[in-house]
Image (tube, rainbow, N blue to C red):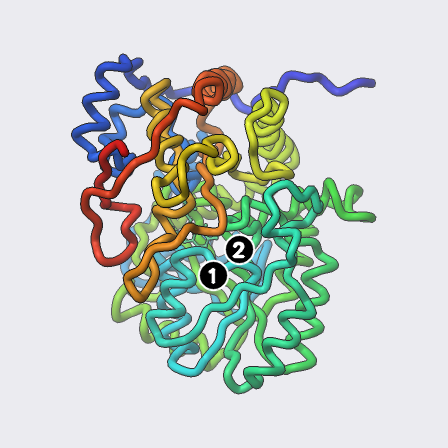
Amino acid sequence: MEPFRTIIEPFRIKSVEPFALSTREHRQECLEKAGFNLFALHAADVMIDLLTDSGTGAMSAEQWAAMMRGDESYAGSPSFYRFEAAVKELFPFRHVIPTHQGRAAEKILFSVIGGTGKTIPNNTHFDTTRANVEFTGAEAVDCLIPEGRVASSTHPFKGNMDLVALDRLVADRGRQNVPAVFVTVTNNSGGGQPVSLENLRGVRAICDRHRVPLFLDGCRFAENAWFIHEREPGQSGRKVRDIVRELGSLFDGMTMSAKKDGLSNIGGWLAVNDDELARKCRNLLILTEGFPTYGGLAGRDLEAIAQGLREVVQHDYLRYRISSTGYLGEALTRLGVPVVQPIGGHAVYLDARALLPQVPPLEYPGQALAVELYLEGGVRGCEIGTVMFGRQRDGTEKPAAMDLVRLALPRRTYTQSHVDYVIEVVDRVAQRAGKLRGLCIASEPPALRHFSATFTPA
Ligand code: F0G
């Protein structure tokens, strides 16, 4: 039988959160007040918020119920043990250390294993990972397959590690200078693209040969496992839960932001097998995050994550999740809007440089497009391009590799008609894209300028 064309959300809505339908005039005023930086908007002035999929999803009734069970004991809370059991059901690492979010796990781990002269390879470091590696004086190196850098390439696993480059890098730097190899699933900075099991086994073999530990940045592990289920030969008959367990078993440890595939609004963890490493990390955890059975989280947050981890590997959920992202990306592709192919798991990435060829990279086509989408329909996306990456350490500025606008879909939050509305908004802006002008930076901070820079129309 033909499958239905309509994406049926595998949930119904029990509690609604109204948002105001604003006017274009109001949005113009808001933009001016915000210095044309969408991070400076009040969220109440946004209609469809696609800034991030991190911590912005809707929780299930079972998660809200679990929160009432949250036990706030400082030490040894039953909520911690439920959280730990849920993590270990998917990722059976010996030590599971809760943190308030992903970057806290990164900060702790790299404080222990990083330092000057060290190198951490990854398929692509996410910004916070790179920043936490570099903060210790270590070098963060990306070893992505070449297809992963080509917006139009339709390789099914564009997040894969370049095994030859990785092997050469580890050999060049020496195993004593590579305290860990990382793999990020899915590859957020590269368009939400998955990594195959076969590739992960190859990475594992290289790490074994050089005797270097292998770590997972697992933020979107369930979405990655769904792509493996759908695309990797021999995997379609398996349960996603089993694919996740096999994936996890290839690693020596992981960092995680539960704000993504933990289906929670806050939280994360660091997990490791090595007892000595765990001891050092727990000592740092106590310094900044909290006691090892809560790690900066409330007991109720631990409960929400434990339940979220059970829900996120369900096939009905993942089929809906990945097909709704695909629905947005494919509709835009049909309308002739240039988007990164194939469509990733959590977001659609618009190619602003291709859509606004009249705007030079140093007038920020991504920012211009993101601003226009907000003005047109109250849709907030995020520039990932020259505003984010253009400022160099020596103070000069150069165009980023790509100028993209990421439309990230919060989990279980917007319906198909919200997405249809977004498609209309992007289409209208795309039709007059040739007339859009760029922006100049009016003020910027010394680092991470995309969060607080202000702009004026060029
Ligand atoms: N690793 C990846 C791949 C991420 O996407 C993120 C967060 C982190 C680590 C850090 O986790 O936010 O809990 O500290 N990504 C968000 C985003 C912020 O919008 O893509 P965190």
Point 35% across, 29% down: residue: 437
Q: Is residue 101 visible?
A: no
Q: Position of residue 374 (x, y in %)?
A: 34, 25
Tell me where residue 260 appears, x and y as whole percent. Answer: 46, 44
Q: Are marks 1 and 2 in contact (CB under 8 Å)?
A: yes
**Element at badge 2?**
loop
The image shows residue 386, relative to residue 428, as above or below, that is below
Where is residue 263 drawn, in percent x and y? 46, 41
Who is closer to the viewer here, 16 or 104?
Answer: 104
Q: Is residue 48 above or below residue 241?
A: above
Residue pointed to by mark 2: 218
Give whichever of discs 1 and 2 has the lower sequence position. 2
Residue tagged 1: 255
x and y percent of residue 22 in the render? 28, 15
Taking depth in this image into account, of 455 and 312 the one nearest to the observer is: 455
Q: CA distance from mark 1 to mark 2?
A: 6 Å
